[in-house]
Amino acid sequence: MSDKEKEEFYIKFKERLENTTEFPSDYTYKFIVPTDNKRLAEVQRVFDGARPQFQMKESKTGKYTSVTVVVYVLDADQVIHYYQQAASVKDVMML
């Protein structure tokens, strides 16, 4: 995805968030991460200081781990900020 496409995606996503979510509120993020302690720690670091609640579950094969994170956010910009930070973790899939 090009930088322009990413920018357009986040603009539309912000509009949808503002139309469907009342802020401030708890927001649930879901990720699929290769089961690797380093990558899992990187995802956790994205939310440092946010007092997140994590739930992790390995796939049946153990190859991947689903990560659910609940964080109290103030606005749509903060939601997007965490998604953008998580996108920098190698091989993370955002749901």
Image (cartoon, rainbow, N blue to C red):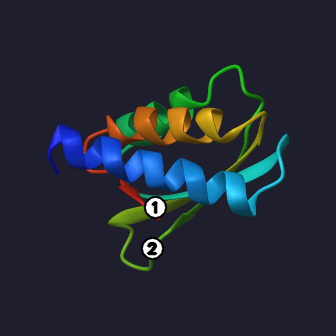
Kind of residue indicated by mark 1: Thr
Element carrying mark 2? loop
Distance from label 2 to label 1 (Cα)?
6 Å
Residue identifier under label 1: 65
Left-right relation of 21 to 93: right
- x and y, in percent, of residue 30 in the image: 55, 59
- Mark 2 highlights which residue? 59
Q: Position of residue 17 (x, y in %)?
A: 64, 55
Mark nearer the N terminus (2 vs 1): 2
Residue located at (85% from left, 40% from top): 24
Q: Is residue 22 left or right of residue 30?
A: right
Kindly give the residue lying farthest to the bottom in the view shown: 60
50, 80: nearer the viewer: 80
Query: Residue at 43% across / 46% down in the picture?
Result: 10
Q: Secondary structure at mark 1?
A: strand
Q: Is residue 45 left or right of residue 79?
A: left
Q: Could you tell me residue 20's position as x and y percent?
A: 73, 63
- Residue at x 69% of width, y 51% of height: 18
The answer to the question of whether label 2 and label 1 lie on touching residues, with beta carbons closer than 8 A, is yes
Residue 52's image quarter?
Answer: top right
Is residue 87 placed above or below 12 in the rendered structure? Answer: above
Residue 32 is situated, as x and y percent measured from the top left of the image, at: 42, 61
Q: Residue at x 83, y 52 (%)?
A: 22
Residue 95 visible from this viewpoint: yes
| Crowd band around label 2 with a 10 angstrom C-alpha radius: few (<14), some (14–19), many (20+) | few
